Image: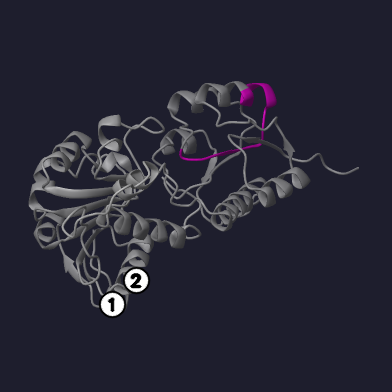
């Protein structure tokens, strides 16, 4: 007699290819039409008694939720690189394996960062608004001018996989690359980029600043009024990493007074309901946390999450475990 299929609780739908694999290999709880809330996840887990749970960054699993999970849960797989939505000590302390999905979304996140750089620099939000209103008149030669990206100096805070991929793309625009990181990269990885031991040393030299580091207690609100003031007046600010890195009141003030000319933002402190004062500014180009939102990447992420789940349930080493 065949062994029963393992029971899997999904916090939200996955791409068709991932869903097909899950439906073939697992017994699934009713898949929600929209993202579950933490309370709904706990209630479903208590009813379904799953072996595994799949979540993403939009579904926090904190200590309160972990404490309410049934003992059947052996692994939680987050379909994301980031883990700041998870209480890692609480999860691991329950003896539950934990995994994420690094590497597979590097290219798409870097592509999105370049989109934000270009859109913010070239006033794409304002141009799009003008076109939606019907355009209607010619623009003067000195009207609604953005800034040229080619040849500018790009500063990157966080030179991990995604930061390096952004630098690689920026070089195609003839941009000069500066970076600040916890440690200096090898010469091969730097590829001519200039290293600064602290962001404060780097910021005065940046025409464009792009963030590519994880959120943590130490980095919370690190981009504050003082840090923004160190950028040259008219600089472009881009964040495709985590909203918690930024003091949004300080960013709003800098955008309103023109010290920051424009911002390209994919992430916010309060998701999915960001501060309207920020996203309604004409010099902000905003996207709804979609750095990995391509069919190819979301499928790769989901497949890696399933690989981790299957490994955990078979008592094999996880391909991409999250450690304490």
> In the orientation shown, which residue stands out farthest toward the front?
137
Between 127 and 252, the one nearer to me in the picture: 127
Q: Please report the residue visible at 68 percent of the width from the left and 48 percent of the height from the top.
A: 16
Q: Residue furthest right?
A: 1
Q: Nearer the viewer, residue 309 or 211?
A: 211
Which residue range is magenta in the image?
44-57
Dot 2: element: helix
Q: Position of residue 10 (x, y in %)?
A: 62, 36
Residue drawn at (23%, 43%) of the image? 218
49 or 206, which lies in front?
206
Q: Contact, CB < 8 Å: mark 1 with mark 2?
A: yes
- Residue 121 image point, x, y percent: 25, 57
**Residue tagged 1:** 191
Q: Quadrant of the N terminus?
A: top right
What is the crowding at mark 2: few (fewer than 14 residues within 10 Å), some, or many (at least 20)? some
Q: Is residue 200 magenta?
A: no
Q: State the CA–CA distance, disc 1 to disc 2.
A: 9 Å
- Look at the picture and state if 14 lies above or below 167: above
In this figure, which residue is indicated by the disc labeled 2? Answer: 168
45 inside magenta stretch: yes
Q: Residue at x 50, y 50 (%)?
A: 293
Is label 1 or label 2 in front? 2
């Amino acid at each position: 007699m065949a062994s029963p299929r393992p029971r899997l609780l999904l916090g939200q739908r996955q791409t068709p290819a991932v869903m097909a694999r899950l439906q073939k290999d697992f017994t699934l709880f009713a898949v929600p039409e929209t993202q579950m809330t933490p309370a709904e996840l706990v209630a479903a887990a208590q009813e379904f008694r799953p072996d595994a749970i799949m979540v993403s960054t939009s579904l926090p699993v904190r200590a309160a939720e972990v404490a309410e999970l049934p003992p059947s849960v052996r692994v939680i797989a987050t379909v994301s690189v980031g883990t700041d939505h998870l209480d890692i000590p609480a999860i691991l302390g329950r003896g539950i394996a934990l995994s994420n999905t690094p590497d597979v979304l590097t290219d798409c996140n870097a592509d999105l960062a370049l989109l934000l750089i270009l859109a913010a620099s070239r006033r794409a939000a304002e141009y799009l608004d003008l076109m939606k209103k019907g355009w209607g008149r010619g623009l003067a030669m000195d009207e609604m001018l953005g800034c040229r990206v080619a040849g500018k100096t790009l500063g990157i805070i966080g030179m991990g996989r995604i930061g390096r991929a952004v630098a690689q793309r920026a070089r195609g625009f003839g941009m000069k690359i500066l970076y600040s990181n916890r440690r200096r990269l090898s010469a091969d990885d730097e590829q001519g980029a200039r290293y600064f031991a602290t962001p404060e040393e780097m910021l005065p030299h940046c025409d464009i600043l792009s963030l590519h580091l994880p959120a943590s207690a130490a980095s919370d609100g690190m981009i504050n009024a003082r840090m923004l003031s160190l950028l040259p007046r008219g600089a472009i600010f881009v964040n495709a990493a985590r909203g918690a890195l930024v003091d949004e009141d300080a960013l709003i003030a800098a955008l309103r007074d023109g010290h920051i000319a424009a911002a390209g933002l994919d992430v916010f402190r309060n998701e999915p309901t960001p501060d309207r004062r920020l996203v309604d500014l004409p010099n902000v180009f905003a996207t709804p946390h979609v750095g990995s939102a391509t069919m190819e990447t979301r499928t790769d992420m989901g497949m890696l999450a399933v690989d981790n789940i299957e490994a955990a349930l078979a008592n094999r080493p996880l391909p991409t475990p999250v450690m304490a």
